[in-house]
Amino acid sequence: MTPILLTTIILLLAVCVTTLVVLNRRKDLALAELLAEEKAIVDEERRMFGFLHDLGEAITREDSHAALHRLIVKGAIQVTESQGGALYLLDDVGKALVPRYYSDLCPPLLELPERIAALGKKNPDSLLSFLRLHTVRPDEGLIGSVFSGRNSEVIADLRKDLRLAGGSSLQNNVSIMIGALKFGAGSLGVLIVTRPKERPTYNSNDFEVFKSLVEQSAFALANVMAHQAATEKKHIEAELRAASDIQRILLPDHDPKLQGYHIVGRNIPARVLSGDYYDFIPLEDGRWGAVIADVSGKGPAAAIITAMCRSVLRCAAPGGASPAEVLASVNRHIAPDIREDMFVSMIYLVFDPADNRVTLARAGHTLPVLWRQEGGVIETLHSGGLAVGIDKGDVFERVTKNLEFFMEPGDCLLLYTDGVNEALDTKGLEYGEERLRSNLALLAPQGPKAVVDGLIADVEKFLGGRRSLDDITLIALQKTP
């Protein structure tokens, strides 16, 4: 073997060895990179599972909203290995996105006023206070755009985003991931995480993980909101039931037993609370008063007004005042204290069981009807009067007058609220005055209880099994032999 050939072989062997070493080194590096990536994925999955576990526990524990908001932002920062983060949620009226949690190291995510930007460079705490208090319109800037677009984005350099109108140096070289928190057809808010330029920008895997975080956070927030709404509804229902119990106590617990008259009253609320009321009031010299009233509207406000009317009328009725004078007193006390769009229709009557005379005054209420046993005819008792609350005094007292009439044995007087005659059937037709009068003529010979029970049963039949849209109240007064 010649020296040249030997040298060539040695050189070739050296090249092969070097190549093998380089290949092995590259293989080791590739393996190391693969192991590092695998470890990063495992660590990321571990952080993600930890976040979901903490989120689930927070919902189960019914943590405060502030604690849940903090958990979402800090969890998102940790899972995505970010430095800052923020959570904006839509307010109750849908007018603004409110920063519910803004981390200490989160840069400005909105266009800053010049004064705030300058102050922020000198005093970061002042800037952070501004960011934690400043709301954003649902269509304003970057945050509003993502919210209204219901999407998620990765932004490599926050300052260069055109939606910030040039941005601030405080936003320079900051990369962010931002996503709309969606649930069903609605949007709850926006979640953001941020990284400074010293760290790598977010990659596609980071973005996929972030979108999962956004989805899980939206689900958790929606569950908490639904639970809160259900809890608040239960509290409101409990309060309404308690108020209804009190309201029922304010109604007569029984019909009075009278010598000379038989009187029956009944109230059926359309909702938990009634805007109707009736009352029987013992007066001096053996006389009795009876009142029926209907407050415009329904619910708690109407129920409060009925309680006010009852109290004022019970104070004004004794002492020999006429029905018109009593209603005038009620109006003077009630009118200044109710909303302009509210009023109360009332009828107050006084009768003496020892004679046939009845005196009533009407404040804008449905006209009472009187069935006469002799002849079986029905009379409508016309009496002028303005509803309580429309005028504070002079006009009300000028038009509200006493009406005096006599009842013979067997005659039956019916007072009722418009929940009876204005009840609607499944076709939208009214129960009406004629049907009411026909039924009164049929039922009156059987007594006032038959009148009240029979009319209520017929109205319920007319409604076709549906709940009445308005309160129903009736009083039947019959003169006995």
Image: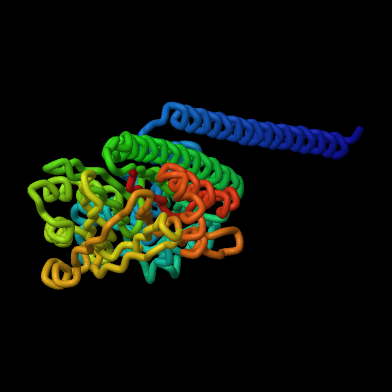
How many discs appear? 0
Which quarter of the picture shows residue 21?
top right
Residue 298 x %, y %: 36, 54
Residue toward you, 239 or 332:
332
Tell me the quadrant of the picture where the N terminus can be found.
Answer: top right
Residue 347 relative to residue 230: left or right: left
Examine the rendered structure and indicate whether residue 386 appears above or below residue 174.
below
Instruction: Using residue 456 as the reference point, say whether residue 417 is left or right of it.
Output: left
- The image position of residue 136, as x and y in percent, is 35, 61
Relative to 428, say whether 4 is above or below.
above
Name the residue nearer the viewer: 342 or 107.
Answer: 342
Which quarter of the rendering shows the C terminus? top left
The residue shown at (23%, 54%) is 357
Q: Which residue occupies 41% across, 40% down?
A: 233
> Residue 226: image x %, image y %?
47, 41
Q: State whether residue 179 appears in this view.
A: no
Instruction: Residue at 27% x, 68% y: name it.
Output: 383
